[in-house]
Image (cartoon, helix red, strand yellow):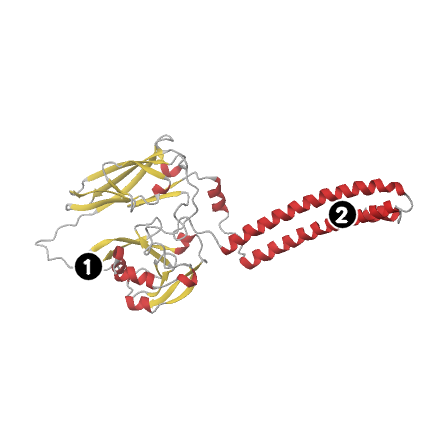
């Protein structure tokens, strides 16, 4: 349009009015493009901050980790010494647990830092897991120190081709093993035989052993006292758990009563402890040890209430089962209750992984957008200047 008006000015001076109208439109376009340039520049600044200072996970550590907080982030801060220090101190029975699995300190020291695929490998962690295989760990004297669990990594990460970084070595008892950088947990290909307990003195006479059978159920009281696993728990729902334990053996037997609520209390609060004792640090609800006579059955009941504002905390970095819109709980058998999460969590579950673009791709894309906006801005500015020059020449009578 600009070229058409200028070429016809000498034949029809009345077109100067259209030239003025065109100049006004150019000034408006120039203002619009200047604003666009400012916003693109601001977006580029935000992009640079996201590239050079990425966000950290809101839940980078979990009580199930062998080494809470992991063994360091990135190449500069990683160190196997972050694993060996709590190992040597036997912090949280780490040395006894690793020895029970079948791995020695010398084998750990000789491990090399590299990566591996999750595949069918087994990740070891503290406490029972919904998809895990329980394994009873023992100390050097053969005394029972508790249950650990071996869970397939493909179940933990929901991906059997995920790249995991850590120290990989070889054990004479379990073969291939690794120490995960993110959490310090041990990874193996197999589950070794459980270590044997210390040999007790011979009994005066053989007696049938006791056999404690554990079971668990949950009712959503708010939604009509129905099976809590069959409906999604909503805000402020009250859920009642019943723990049952029966001695199906022939002799009396003592048993510990402990229920790990660490995953449940991410979305709920303990409303009624049912006479038990709750440890907020470990998330374990426990009762005094009881001795059951043959065929005797007892139960314990406690209640929780779903939070009034269900958090939209992202899935944990070291434990993807944390804040996954599920309340997992195991007492003999697993109880999994779905939770109605906020829209951001739904998006997180649907879009499990963003496109794999690194800093280079992001900066190139931002540079291209900035170049395009800058070009149109200066082009508008140049056209506006040309209009002013033509109007000046026209008023001077040189056109």
Query: For mark 2, what is the residue?
Result: 384
Residue 261 versus residue 49: which sits nearer the camera? 49
Q: Are marks 2 and 1 in contact (CB under 8 Å)?
A: no
Query: For mark 1, what is the residue?
Result: 142
What residue is at 34 percent from the left and 31 percent from the top?
221
Of badges 2 and 1, the one in the foreground is 2
Asked whether residue 60 appears in the rendered view, the answer is yes
Q: Position of residue 184 (x, y in %)?
A: 35, 58
Residue 17 versus residue 362: which sits nearer the camera? 17
Residue 62 versus residue 234: which sits nearer the camera? 62
What residue is at 40 percent from the left and 49 percent from the top?
316
Q: Position of residue 304 (x, y in %)?
A: 32, 36
Query: Is 2 left, or right, of 149 in this rendering?
Result: right
Label for residue 7?
none
Asked whether residue 171 appears in the rendered view, the answer is no
Q: Position of residue 111 (x, y in %)?
A: 35, 67
Q: Is residue 23 above or below residue 93?
A: above
């Amino acid at each position: 349009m600009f070229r058409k008006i200028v070429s016809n000015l000498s034949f029809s001076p009345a077109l100067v009015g259209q030239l003025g109208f065109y100049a006004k439109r150019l000034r408006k376009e120039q203002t619009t493009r200047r604003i666009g340039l400012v916003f693109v520049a601001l977006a580029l600044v935000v992009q640079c901050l996201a590239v050079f200072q990425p966000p950290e996970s809101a839940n980078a550590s979990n009580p199930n980790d062998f080494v809470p907080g992991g063994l360091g982030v990135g190449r500069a801060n990683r160190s196997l010494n972050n694993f060996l220090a709590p190992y040597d101190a036997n912090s949280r029975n780490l040395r006894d647990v690793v020895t029970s699995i079948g791995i020695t300190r010398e084998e750990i020291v000789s491990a090399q830092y590299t990566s591996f695929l999750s595949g069918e490998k087994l990740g070891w962690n503290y406490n029972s897991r919904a998809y895990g295989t329980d394994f009873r760990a023992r100390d050097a004297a053969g005394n029972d120190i508790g249950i650990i669990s071996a869970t397939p990594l493909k179940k933990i990460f929901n991906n059997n081709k995920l790249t995991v970084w850590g120290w990989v070595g070889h054990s004479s008892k379990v073969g291939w093993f690794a120490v995960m950088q993110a959490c310090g947990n041990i990874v193996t290909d197999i589950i070794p035989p459980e270590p044997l307990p210390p040999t007790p003195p011979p009994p005066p006479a053989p007696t049938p052993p006791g056999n404690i059978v554990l079971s668990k159920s949950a009712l959503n009281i708010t939604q009509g006292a129905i099976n809590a696993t069959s409906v999604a728990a909503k805000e402020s729902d009250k859920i009642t758990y019943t723990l049952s334990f029966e001695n199906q053996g022939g002799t009396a037997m003592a048993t510990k009563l402990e229920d790990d609520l660490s995953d449940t209390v991410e979305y709920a609060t303990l409303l009624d402890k049912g006479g038990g004792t709750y440890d907020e640090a470990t998330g374990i609800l426990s009762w005094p040890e009881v001795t059951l006579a043959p065929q005797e059955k007892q139960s314990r009941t406690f209640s929780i209430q779903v939070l009034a504002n269900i958090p939209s905390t992202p899935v944990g970095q070291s434990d993807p089962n944390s804040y996954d819109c599920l309340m997992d709980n195991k007492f003999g058998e697993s109880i999994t209750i779905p939770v109605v999460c906020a829209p951001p969590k739904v998006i997180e579950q649907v879009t499990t992984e963003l496109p794999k673009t690194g800093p280079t791709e992001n900066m190139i894309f931002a540079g291209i957008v900035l170049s395009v906006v800058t070009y149109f801005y200066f082009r508008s500015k140049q056209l506006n200047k040309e209009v002013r020059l033509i109007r000046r020449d026209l008023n001077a009578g040189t056109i």
